[in-house]
Each structure stands twice: as C-alpha cells, then as structure tokens.
C-alpha cells in the first residue's frame, strides 16, 4: 500500500471494530431489558455443535495446508509463503465454517 493509505486504513479498521463492539453491547443490553434470555439450552447445544465441527474443519485445513507446503517445498520447489497469509486463511476457514454451521444447525429441525 502507499505510504498514506495504510494509516488511514488502520484507523478505519480500529473505528469499525469499536463501532461493532458498541453495537454488540447495545444489542445485548436491549435484549436483557426486553426480557429475552441470552441463551437457552437449544442455542447452547447448536453453538457447541457448530464450534466442535468448526474446530475439526480448521484442524484438518491446517494439516492439509502444512502437507501442501511440506511436499511442495520438497517435490516442486514451492516458494516460501508468508506466515501471515496462512494464518489469515486458517482463521477465515475456521470462522466462516463456524458461522455457516451455526446457521445450518439453527435452521435444522431437531
């Protein structure tokens, strides 16, 4: 990135994180005032099931990524990849799979 865009982008990301945090806290307080429970047994079971499945998916993705890198370096002279991009990929796969699975399990009739 250019010299001027990175500080502006960093400030924008920080502001966005703070705004999302404020919204989440506001939403939780609003739901409590209206008498909605924060989580019931079904929601806890769905979240636990989705978290367990997302952990397994993320672990398998990490193992597959490590095998690709290991065999790619040994067999086909794959260039070194920056670890930051690999961490971002693992986090995205884990978090997106958790969100999708939580939505899927929530829509399924038990």
Image: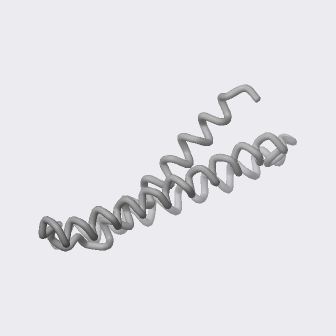
- Determine which quarter of the picture holds residue 73: bottom left
Q: Nearer the viewer, residue 76 or 99?
A: 76
* Image spot of residue 78 (x, y percent): 15, 67
* Image spot of residue 44 (x, y percent): 77, 48
For the point 37% across and 63% down, which residue is it? 88
Q: How is the model colour-coded?
A: one colour
Q: Is residue 17 above or below residue 30?
A: below
Quarter of the image for the C terminus: give it. Answer: top right
Quarter of the image for the N terminus: give it. Answer: bottom left
* Image spot of residue 105 (x, y percent): 65, 36
Q: Is residue 5 above or below residue 45?
A: below
Q: Nearer the viewer, residue 46 or 1?
A: 46
For the point 71% across and 51% down, which residue is it? 48
**Horizontal relation, residue 53 to residue 59: left or right:** right
- Which residue sits furthest front? 75
**Horizontal relation, residue 3 to residue 16: left or right:** left
For the point 56% across and 52% down, which residue is it? 54
- Which residue sits furthest top? 109
Q: Nearer the viewer, residue 65 or 82?
A: 65
**Labels in figure, total:** 0
- Which residue sits furthest right? 35
For the point 29% across and 66% down, which residue is it? 8
**Horizontal relation, residue 76 to residue 21: left or right:** left
């Amino acid at each position: 990135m250019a010299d001027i865009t990175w500080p502006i982008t960093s400030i924008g990301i920080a502001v966005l994180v703070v705004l999302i945090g404020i919204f989440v806290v506001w939403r939780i307080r609003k739901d409590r005032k209206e008498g909605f429970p924060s989580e019931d047994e079904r929601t806890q079971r769905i979240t636990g099931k989705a978290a367990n499945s997302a952990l397994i998916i993320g672990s398998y993705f990490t193992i597959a990524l490590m095998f690709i890198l290991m065999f790619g370096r040994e067999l086909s002279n794959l260039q070194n990849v920056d670890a930051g991009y690999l961490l971002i990929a693992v986090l995205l796969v884990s978090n997106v799979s958790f969100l999708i699975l939580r939505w899927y399990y929530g829509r399924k009739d038990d």
